[in-house]
Image (cartoon, grey):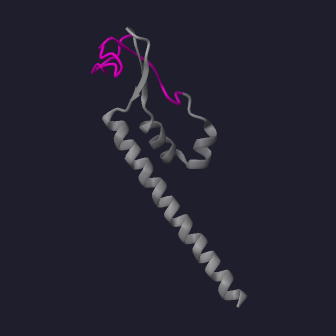
């Protein structure tokens, strides 16, 4: 099966004869949806690169689509926001322990 849409050339030999092997995480683990939530799970699935295989040299490589790059930026942004609020929560908790302990 040739890659559909825009042909992704092989980075090793430059051949345009490539084949879509699979998208990473094609069967998304249900535990991630339970832990992360549906929205974050969908953004994570969107940002995963698509794997290709060169038919000339059998080299496997992965490329992200433009929408996948947007998904990656959204995923990183959500992770930063979650980490920020988690750190703030921990600092407030530690502050309360110190104030009540004194």
Give the main secondary structure of the magenta stretch: loop
74 falls in the magenta region: no
- On the image, the x and y values in percent for residue 46 come to 43, 37
Q: State the residue in front, 30 or 95.
A: 95
- On the image, the x and y values in percent for residue 9 come to 30, 19
Image: 46 above or below 52 = below
Image: 97 above or below 80 = below
Task: State the image quarter where residue 31 is shown.
Answer: top right
In the picture, measured across the screen, residue 17 lies left or right of residue 20, that is left
Which segment is the magenta one? 1-26
Residue displayed at 42% across by 38% down: 47
Residue displayed at 42% across by 24% down: 61
The extreme front residue here reads: 12
Task: State the image quarter where residue 57 is shown.
Answer: top left
In the picture, measured across the screen, residue 60 lies left or right of residue 96, that is left
Image: 92 above or below 66 = below
- On the image, the x and y values in percent for residue 86 come to 56, 64
4 falls in the magenta region: yes
Quadrant where the C terminus lies?
Answer: bottom right
In the picture, measured across the screen, residue 2 lies left or right of residue 94, that is left
Residue displayed at 34% across by 19% down: 10
The extreme bottom residue here reads: 102
Quadrant where the N terminus lies?
Answer: top left
Task: State the image quarter where residue 56 is shown.
Answer: top left
- On the image, the x and y values in percent for residue 3 come to 35, 16
Residue displayed at 44% across by 48% down: 75
């Amino acid at each position: 099966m040739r890659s559909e849409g825009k042909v992704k050339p092989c980075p090793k030999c430059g051949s345009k004869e490539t084949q879509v092997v699979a998208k990473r995480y094609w069967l998304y683990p249900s535990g991630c949806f339970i832990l992360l939530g549906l929205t974050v799970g969908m953004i994570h699935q969107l940002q995963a690169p698509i794997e290709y295989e060169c038919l000339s040299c059998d080299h496997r490589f992965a490329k992200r689509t433009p929408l996948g790059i947007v998904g990656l930026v959204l995923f990183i942004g959500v992770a930063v926001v979650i980490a920020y609020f988690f750190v703030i929560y921990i600092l407030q908790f530690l502050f309360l322990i110190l104030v009540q302990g004194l």
